[in-house]
Amino acid sequence: MTEYDVVIVGGGMVGATLALMLAQRPGLRIAIVEAAAAPRADGGFQPSFDGRSTALSRSTAQAFVQLGLWSEIRRYSNPIGHIEVSEQGRWGRVRLDAAEEGVEALGFVMENAWLGRLLYGACAADAAIDWLSECRVQSIDTAAGMQRVQAQDAQGELLLQARLLVAADGAHSSLRAAMQVASDTFDYTQCAVVCNVESSEAHADRAYERFCHGEVLALLPRVDASRALIWTASPARARELERAQEGEFLRQLGQRLGPAWGRWRARTAPVVYPLQRIIARQQVQAGRVLLGNAAHFLHPVAGQGFNLCVRDAAALARTVHAQLERGADPGEVASLRLYEQGRQRDQAMITTFSDRLVRLFGVDHVLLSHLRSLGMSLFDLTPGSKTLLARLSMGAL
């Protein structure tokens, strides 16, 4: 049996970030149990670190500054200088500008695969962290106040023991089920069609979100001059877009965005992802915590899912460090409940904002469309309202 202070199940972006945050305190021993192979140096993808792009808020950027990773991350990320939200065929729109908010950027866009390789490299270089690749959890139990994890890798069976077990194994978490934690699931009956596209017009560090008769198109500027496209539609429509010939796909994209964008070309093939909201009814037990998508899986419309998870991870790391400073057990249920309570406001605000945005723009009705257009125009002209939205997008509320 190998003993650790913390075992993290799930070596995706959230699990790896938490491990690095925990390792800031000398003396901790941390294990990451990851079912997938380690990220490939040649640029290949794996399930946790794929070709999708993630918008990093300013609060997330600051977290990586504190980990000493930001200068490297910044090299592979593109700043968001402007954000524009509009609805096809309507005059109302909302514009956010970094210069108006007095900041360098409203956020940054980075490909998951690049971020994953940087996080993995940092974890592999840290003597406090053991990264167990291609290792699957078979069972978990509690004995004498310790969390025991039985796992299997290519060499055989492993038995790990820790004072704190963190389940960061995704939206359909097997550990959440093993912990017998119920979740509330809402199926949006939507899918995201994700790919990278490039226009003859430079992206100029601009991010766009356009609502089009029940569909949503988001475009994020990438460091290679392309744009990450997230096209949300009904499942049948998403599959139709996925199967469409490249020329037809680009024609429909241009039709929804208008001629000002210039000529489009595809950089990657579209991939479809079903969209749900999954919220765990509790996030902590004695010696156990749900983190990342295992705790809350959100619609991507507001682009805040990963940023919320990073703030959760930072708060959990502070809780663990504070417990150890007092000579107390980091898995003590009272301290974990305080962590959970402390995160409720932020989680509720982002979850509600994301959900209501989907519902508000998901209804294709002429009268409601006019009202939305009026509302966006008033919002764009109201002093202080844009700053509030900008602060939310930057993770600064």
Image (cartoon, rainbow, N blue to C red):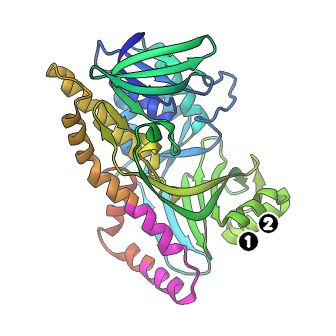
Q: What amino acid is at disc 1?
A: Gln
Residue of label 1: 255
**Camera-side residue of 11 and 211:** 11
| Residue contact between numbered discs 2 and 1, judged by CB atoms under 8 Å | yes
Residue of label 2: 251
Left or right, 218 with reference to 259: left
Q: Is residue 372 magenta?
A: yes
Quadrant in the rendering for residue 187: bottom right
Q: Which element carries disc 2, helix, strand or loop?
A: helix
Q: Which element carries disc 1, helix, strand or loop?
A: helix
The picture places residue 130, in percent across and down from the top left corner, at: 46, 15
The picture places residue 363, in percent across and down from the top left corner, at: 55, 78
Vertical order, 233 against 103 (above or below): below
Q: Main secondary structure of the magenta part?
A: helix
Which label number is shown at residue 302? Answer: none
The N terminus sits in image quarter: top left
**Camera-side residue of 343 and 224:** 343
Q: Residue at x 31, y 40 (%)?
A: 284
Q: Is residue 320 magenta?
A: no
Q: How crowded is the residue under tag 2: few (<14 C-alpha within 10 Å), some, or many (20+)?
A: some
Q: Which residues are magenta?
A: 352-375
Vertical order, 235 against 149 (above or below): below
Residue 51 appears anywhere in the view: yes
Quadrant in the rendering for residue 111: top right
Q: Residue at x 65, y 23 (%)?
A: 40
Q: What amino acid is at disc 2?
A: Arg
The picture places residue 384, in percent across and down from the top left corner, at: 29, 68
**Distance from the alpha carbon under mark 2 to that under mark 1:** 6 Å
Left or right, 274 with reference to 381: right
